[in-house]
Image: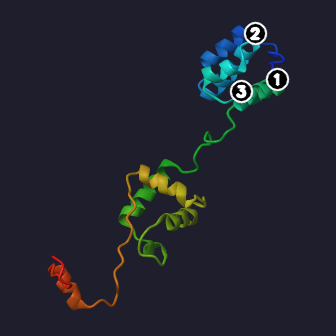
């Protein structure tokens, strides 16, 4: 015996036409998917067909319908994240760009000589009182056109004679 099929219990005073109009007016793909799943399931279309049409999994279709049954107004709002407005304003982004190009960390009292994401995170927190993780800042910097360059290791007490031979491209070990 198979599992009981998930059903739309009620349309909460709306008609199928009302729901179809809401689908047309919806700006969010999440809202369109929820309403489409409800309409299709209420019309008797199988969960497998709904999955194929929407391109989502069975648990997702089940979640859409269960949330609709519990609270229709709340079910069509996307609560997955990503819709939160950024705390970083355009002025802050321009300030970050200016600081990275024209200023050194030592100008702000930091003991490092080059900027990195962790130090930039600390600068933003000190300046604006908002904390950002360095992974997110790395994505922001890439979007702004900056690239990451690893510092080259330079020994502080290297032999100057060997350095000169290397610069002149002299082979020390007999390799040709």
Q: Nearer the viewer, mark 1 or mark 3?
A: 1
Q: Tag 2: Cα neighbours inside 10 Å, few (<14), some, or many (≥20)?
A: few
Q: Is residue 45 above or below residue 26?
A: above
Q: Residue 4 versus residue 173: which sits nearer the camera?
A: 173
The residue pinned by badge 2 equals: 15
Q: Residue 114 versus residue 156: which sits nearer the camera?
A: 156
The residue pinned by badge 1 equals: 2
Specify which label sits upstream in the sequence, 2 or 1: 1
Q: Tag 3: Cα neighbours inside 10 Å, few (<14), some, or many (≥20)?
A: many
Specify which label sits upstream in the sequence, 1 or 3: 1
Q: Locate residue 159, reporting x and y percent.
A: 26, 91
Is 170 placed left or right of 113 in the picture? left
Label 1, label 3: how far apart the Cα atoms are: 17 Å
Q: Locate residue 30, reporting x and y percent.
A: 64, 29
Q: Quadrant of residue 8?
A: top right
Residue drawn at 70 percent across, 31 percent down: 60
The circle on residue 123 is none
Q: Is residue 21 above or below residue 98?
A: above
Label 2, label 3: how far apart the Cα atoms are: 20 Å
Q: Residue 87 versus residue 154: which sits nearer the camera?
A: 154
Q: Locate residue 119, reporting x and y percent.
A: 51, 68
Specify which label sits upstream in the sequence, 2 or 3: 2
The residue pinned by badge 3 equals: 61
Q: Nearer the viewer, mark 2 or mark 3?
A: 3
Is 119 placed left or right of 82 in the picture? left
Identify the image quadrant of the C terminus. bottom left
């Amino acid at each position: 015996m198979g599992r009981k099929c998930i059903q739309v219990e009620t349309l909460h005073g709306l008609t199928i036409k009302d729901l179809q109009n809401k689908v047309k007016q919806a700006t969010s793909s999440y809202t369109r998917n929820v309403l489409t799943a409800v309409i299709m399931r209420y019309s008797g279309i199988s969960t497998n067909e709904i999955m194929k049409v929407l391109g989502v999994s069975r648990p997702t279709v089940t979640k859409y319908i269960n949330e609709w049954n519990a609270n229709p107004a709340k079910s069509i709002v996307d609560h997955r994240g990503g819709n939160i407005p950024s705390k970083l304003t355009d002025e802050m982004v321009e300030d970050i760009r200016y600081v990275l190009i024209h200023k050194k960390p030592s100008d702000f009292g930091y003991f490092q000589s080059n900027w990195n994401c962790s130090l930039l995170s600390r600068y933003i927190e000190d300046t604006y009182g908002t904390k950002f993780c360095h992974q997110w800042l790395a994505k922001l910097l890439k979007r702004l056109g900056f690239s990451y360059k690893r510092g080259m290791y330079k020994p502080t007490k290297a032999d100057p004679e060997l350095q000169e031979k290397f610069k002149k491209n002299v082979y020390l070990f007999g390799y040709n």
